């Protein structure tokens, strides 16, 4: 059943006449009659009784009329709102984000947001994923951007994409010429890993534990740029995102299993996000989609 069917049905119910309803909907009576028959066929019951030239709605029709009227009212209200230029956003938007997103994704989103809404004031807090979740839950930030964390019943998480983790090594490292590497082969390897406070470290540790691999952790860094710089100048290996800018270091696919992490948007469950937060997330979704298309060559 399409939207036009509901409009024809409501018009006939309110006018009680095919002639008047057809005039109101700017269609011929035969067109209106055909559309009403389609609705009745789909419902499987008569919605109107035809008594001479009069049209009387049936009991079943009355039930449908209530829902149809309500649905059309909401649709029309939405159409009116999007047809009216929105008021410029003002006030302060508070964002909590982990370091990874604060390097490029958040600045790109804010550039687009502030171009459209120059009166808006934005505060971005760079935090660990667990702290992002805590501040969203406490209402200290309006929206959080982080990797998936334990959320309980108080937070909503909208996944943006799933990213694979890969091994980063210098060109002189023994693994540099490998195309793929089983995670178990990292047992005993000297490595740089994120700090134990980060959600990425927990993802890596869980994957390592599943295959009985225990690397030798020589350094712990949360900065991807610093990690890649250390990899470049040493024989240490690191695990980074497939989407990270690895520069001139070699990256090797990991398998059996491939460590995965899921970035997304954290908001308070049941709470209505402020307009500025909704505008920011809309831009974020579009930029993520554009980035994925470019990365995949689509």
Image (spheres, rainbow, N blue to C red):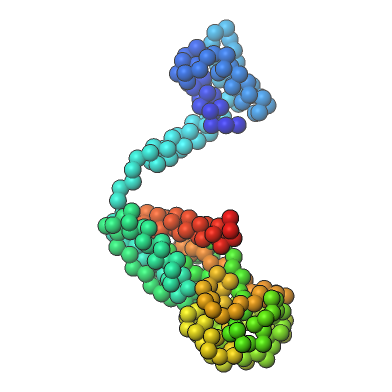
Is 188 situated above or below 256?
below
Asked which quadrant contains residue 250, the reply is bottom right
Q: How many marks?
A: 0
Would residue 139 appear left or right of 173 to someone viewing this image? left
> Is 204 in front, or is 298?
298
Q: Is residue 274 visible?
A: no
Pinpoint residue 194: horizontal percent, then vertical percent.
Answer: 53, 83
Q: Residue at x 52, y 64 (%)?
A: 264
User: Of 155 and 58, which appears nearest the observer?
Assistant: 155
Residue 172, quarter of picture: bottom right
Q: Residue at x 36, y 61 (%)?
A: 111
The residue drawn where x is 52% and y is 23% is: 8
Q: Give the residue drawn at x 45%, y 55%.
A: 282
> Which residue is nearer to you in this view: 96 or 182?
182
Instruction: Tell me if 26 is positioned left or right of 202 in this view.
Output: left
> In the rendered image of this protein, does residue 162 appear above or below residue 74?
below
Q: Nearer the viewer, residue 44 or 77?
A: 77
Q: Residue furthest left?
A: 119
In the rendered view of the protein, which quadrant contains the C terminus? bottom right
In the rendered view, would you say 26 is above or below 100?
Answer: above
């Amino acid at each position: 059943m399409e939207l036009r069917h509901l409009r024809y049905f409501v018009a006939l119910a309110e006018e009680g006449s095919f002639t008047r309803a057809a005039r109101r909907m700017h269609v011929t009576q035969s067109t209106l009659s055909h559309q009403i028959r389609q609705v009745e066929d789909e419902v499987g019951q008569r919605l109107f009784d035809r008594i001479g030239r009069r049209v009387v709605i049936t009991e079943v029709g009355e039930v449908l009329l209530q829902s149809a009227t309500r649905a059309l009212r909401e649709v029309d209200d939405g159409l009116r709102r999007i047809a009216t230029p929105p008021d410029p956003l003002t006030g302060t938007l508070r964002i909590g984000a982990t370091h990874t997103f604060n390097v490029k994704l958040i600045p790109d989103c804010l550039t687009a947001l502030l171009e459209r809404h120059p009166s808006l004031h934005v505060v971005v807090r760079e935090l660990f994923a667990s702290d992002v979740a805590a501040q969203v839950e406490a209402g200290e930030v309006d929206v959080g951007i982080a990797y998936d964390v334990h959320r309980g019943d108080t937070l909503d998480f909208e996944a943006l994409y799933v990213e694979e983790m890969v091994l980063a090594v210098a060109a002189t490292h023994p693994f540099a010429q490998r195309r793929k590497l089983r995670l178990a082969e990292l047992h005993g390897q000297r490595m740089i890993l994120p700090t134990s406070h980060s959600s990425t470290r927990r993802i890596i540790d869980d994957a390592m534990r599943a295959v009985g691999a225990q690397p030798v952790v020589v350094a712990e860094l949360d900065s991807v740029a610093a990690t890649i710089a250390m990899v470049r100048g040493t024989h240490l290996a690191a695990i980074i995102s497939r989407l990270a800018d690895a520069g001139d270091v070699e990256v090797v696919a990991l398998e059996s299993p491939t460590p995965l992490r899921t970035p997304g948007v954290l908001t308070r469950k049941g709470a209505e996000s402020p307009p500025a937060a909704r505008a920011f997330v809309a831009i974020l979704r579009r930029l993520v989609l554009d980035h994925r298309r470019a990365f995949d060559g689509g």
